[in-house]
Amino acid sequence: MTTNEGLSDAERWEQGMTVRRQVLGDEHVDNSIANTTEFTADFQDFITRVAWGDLWSRHGLDRRSRSIAVITSLIAHGHHEELAMHCRAALRNGLTVEEIKEVIIQSAVYSGVPAANTAFRIASEALADEF
């Protein structure tokens, strides 16, 4: 059972926005909303309802585990534009800098050393204030 079973789209959006703000922080979400255009509005609605209101709201994994899975997937698929944001989100979800480092090292074997090397560069910049 998910936390969104039987919810309307509007309720899923509200739930998604709450989770999105908790994970990414108000500043990031406020910037995303401020930069929404007529062209991107449907996508913003979609990711708020589906990624945050459905997926991130499920009971099957805690947020720490979801952050580990997301960081690993971003590294594996080379989605570097999202990695810094999700490294910062992982801190909010209870991971330590040391644990994020271990996730990146783990990914080196399964996703490739070049991917992990890039991830270390991005994470080092994103988490510079934590060192």
Image (cartoon, rainbow, N blue to C red):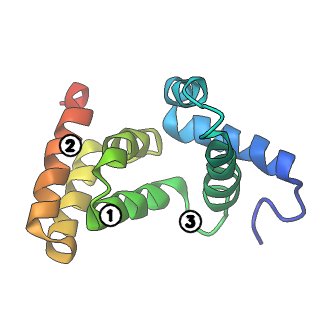
Callout 3 amino acid: Leu
Is the C terminus in the top left, top right, bottom left or bottom right quadrant? top left
Marking on residue 72: 1
Quarter residue 84 falls in: top left
Residue at image x 15%, y 49%? 120
The x, y position of residue 98, in whole percent, is 22, 48
Residue at image x 26%, y 35%? 126
Disc number lying in front (1 or 3):
1
Is the N terminus in the top left, top right, bottom left or bottom right quadrant? bottom right
Q: Which residue is mark 3?
A: 61
Mark 3 secondary-structure assignment: loop
Q: Looking at the image, how many numbered discs can be counted on the residues?
A: 3
Which badge, 2 or 1, is on the more N-terminal residue?
1
Farthest residue in the bottom direction?
Answer: 110
Residue at image x 52%, y 25%? 31
Q: Is residue 6 above or below residue 36?
A: below
Quarter residue 125 falls in: top left
- Left or right relative to 25: residue 54: right
Which badge, 1 or 3, is on the more N-terminal residue?
3
Contact between marks 2 and 1 (CB within 8 A): the answer is: no
What's the CA distance linking mark 2 and mark 1? Answer: 13 Å
- Left or right relative to 41: residue 67: left
Q: Is residue 67 above or below residue 30?
A: below
Residue at image x 22%, y 67%? 107
Q: Which residue is mark 2?
A: 122
Residue closer to the observer: 94 or 36: 36
Callout 2 amino acid: Ile
Farthest residue in the front direction?
Answer: 39
